[in-house]
Image (cartoon, grey):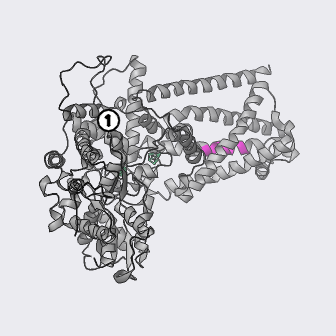
Amino acid sequence: MNVPTMAEMAAQGKQPEVLFWVGCAGSFDDRAKKITKAFVKILNKANVEFAVLGTEESCSGDPAKRAGNEFLFQMQAMTNIEVLNAYEVKKIVTACPHCFNTLKNEYPQLGGNYEVVHHTELLKSLIDDGRLTIEGGQFKGKKITFHDPCYLGRANDVYEAPRALIQKLDVELVEMKRCKTNGLCCGAGGAQMFKEPEKGTKDINVERTEEAIDVKPDIIATGCPFCNTMMTDGVKAKNKETDVEVLDIAELIANAKDL
Amino acid sequence: MNYIDNIVFAILLIIGVGFFARNVKKLIRNIKLGKQLDRSDNSTARWKNMAMIALGQSKMVKRPIAGALHIIVYVGFIIINIEVIEIIIDGLFGTHRVLSFLGGFYSFLIASFEILALLVLVSVIVFWIRRMVLKIPRFWNKEMKGFPKNDALYILYFEMVLMSLFLIMNATDVPFQQADAGNPISQFLVPLFENFNAGTLFYIERTAWWLHIAGILVFLNYLYYSKHLHILLAFPNTYFANLNPKGKLNNLEAVTNEVKMMLDPNADPFAAAPEGSEEEIPEKFGASDVADLNWVQLMNAYTCTECGRCTSACPANITGKELSPRAIMMKTRDRLEEVGENINKNGEFKYDGKQLLNDFITPEEIWACTSCNACVEECPINIDPLSIIIDLRRYLVMEQSAASQELNMMMMNIENNGAPWQYNQMDRLNWKDE
Ligand code: SF4
Ligand code: SF4
């Protein structure tokens, strides 16, 4: 696996095609690290010149902002923007919809202007440009349902790129009752990931997982490390680990290509 | 003594419209209690939104049955109100069906009013059945008790009565029925009145006529107190709605200035404030009461029609949490009304020991939100409950440091390690070699 950092690139006087913003989950969470690696393998395979910030990356500030701590958010944002601008970054890709939304929508007001894409969008454009090819292979005939991450879908209107990628795998894409603009949250957003839920009758991730299980998929696909955790926990809560797998789109593609 | 009628009519009209104007003034004053916010940009997109969403009802039909019925009532309401123009002229000048000189076109107009009136009547009855017989859950959430529940029913009854009066008025208008043009519906009501003599018929017709116009004036004045205000406010509300991607929250300028100071090693914290800023009152971060919200958020509160589409899509509400985005809007309106009443009484706002946060909306509600934007997406008139929730959170966190232990932990980690968990920033690239 080849993972150059911006610092190394800069030392060689090179500017990568795109900066891969890994995010906190992608860097530290054991489950999410697998997604990060799957994505990197695809980038390597497609010969995309990318780089990461490595230890120069810091939390985008999303959970702080959604929790109401504008101070902390802006401190994070301005520190990150300083680093990004120093490297003259133009284009950023990330596998986390929360980072995606924050870099794309919240940073410009603080002086950070970049072209920001979600990894599903980048993967789709690699295929469209012929730089990456995928065939169904091992997923052929499987039933996959896609859970829309709120910060990818409703927040930024990206619904088609992940679906287009799934369809390239020769699988049957089945939609849940609440999908796309009507998609139901997994329960992690708005800093909920970091706290116990308020008193209620049910956990949101269980409600969502039940809906997914209703369409009898072999795989629940998603495009967010937090959704991934929530849905995985939901599947466990329903004792369905043997029947249903929760995978990121990047993992689906990396697996299909045997990377 | 023929003038009595006209004078009574004129007085009724002046009182009705006068009170309405007074309410509108109060409404505007209350909305202006909110903070300024510039939404004068991009007027093309704004007009388009208003045309599509308010005029064209494009978001209503996402739920097809309710949407279709609503369009009938809405179109009926607007078209039938053309008839009111004639009623007003007739009332003021003692004429009868003054527009009938239009001949065939008049018959066509009245005929379409009659058909619409019947359709509206049927739709309103279906609405009533959905609420009271089918008991569709979103009409029965816990915030829909007392006035909010009755309010919805009053309006349905009102429309039933108004539509019936209109048809009865036409059915008992003997010359109109004799002309037998423009009466596709009312002709079937005529047999009901077969045994009445001409005099009685005349009085029934007159009574229906008077009640119809009086009813409209009462309705006009009921609006201010009702969720039905949306029939007017839906238009400015969709015009001034947020045009940014839903994921983008506003940036707090006041915070930006302070953070820049903190990050800039050359900044002199004791430097004199720049010219003209002496009078600036120290900014309060976030919102604890209605006056801390912006005027669009307050207009949102008055516009909310309590349909509950937002709440029925809210993941927190679906899973039994206290939070209901509709209730957020209703409580904001209740508090704003209370503040408005306070100003009416005292000339200016006199501190009443209450505020929106805690006394109306509890922290338990706002902390249950996942910021998923389902409520914003669902709202047929582009109301944004999430922005109010975030502003209340900001106050709790930045002014009161009142976040939960877990959230404080998460924020401390971000501050110290650059990640919401306790990992060292220097380990950020370790995954590469694992
Ligand atoms: S944004 Fe918050 S209030 Fe709105 S639907 Fe989602 S969880 Fe509910
Ligand atoms: S905020 Fe919108 S969707 Fe929610 S109750 Fe009010 S009008 Fe209906």
Main SS, magenta residues: helix
| Any part of residue B97 in sight | no
Residue B391 pos. (x, y %): 32, 38
| Any part of residue B415 in sight | yes
Residue B406 pos. (x, y %): 16, 50
Secondary structure type for disc 1: loop
Considering only vertical position in the picture, is B68 above or below A239?
above
Q: For this rendering, which residue is in front, B62 or B44?
A: B44
Q: Which residues are magenta?
A: B159-167
User: Magenta includes B163?
Assistant: yes
Quadrant in which the C terminus of chain B appears: bottom left
Q: Which residue is mark 1?
A: B252
In this picture, residue B174 sits left or right of residue B299: right
Give the quadrant of residue B356: top left
Quadrant in which the N terminus of chain B appears: top right
Q: For this rendering, which residue is in front, B424 or A80?
A: A80
Residue A192 pos. (x, y %): 25, 53
Residue at image position (66%, 46%) is: B76
User: Magenta includes B156?
Assistant: no
Give the quadrant of residue A82: top left
Q: For this rendering, which residue is in front, A155 or B301?
A: A155
Give the quadrant of residue B283: top left
Q: For this rendering, which residue is in front, B417 or A49?
A: A49
In this picture, residue B142 sits left or right of residue B74: left
Give the residue type that dot 1 points to.
Leu
> Mark 1 packing: few (<14 Cα in 10 Å), some, or many (20+)?
some
Considering only vertical position in the picture, is B230 above or below A89?
above
What chain does badge 1 belong to?
Answer: B
Residue B200 pos. (x, y %): 78, 38
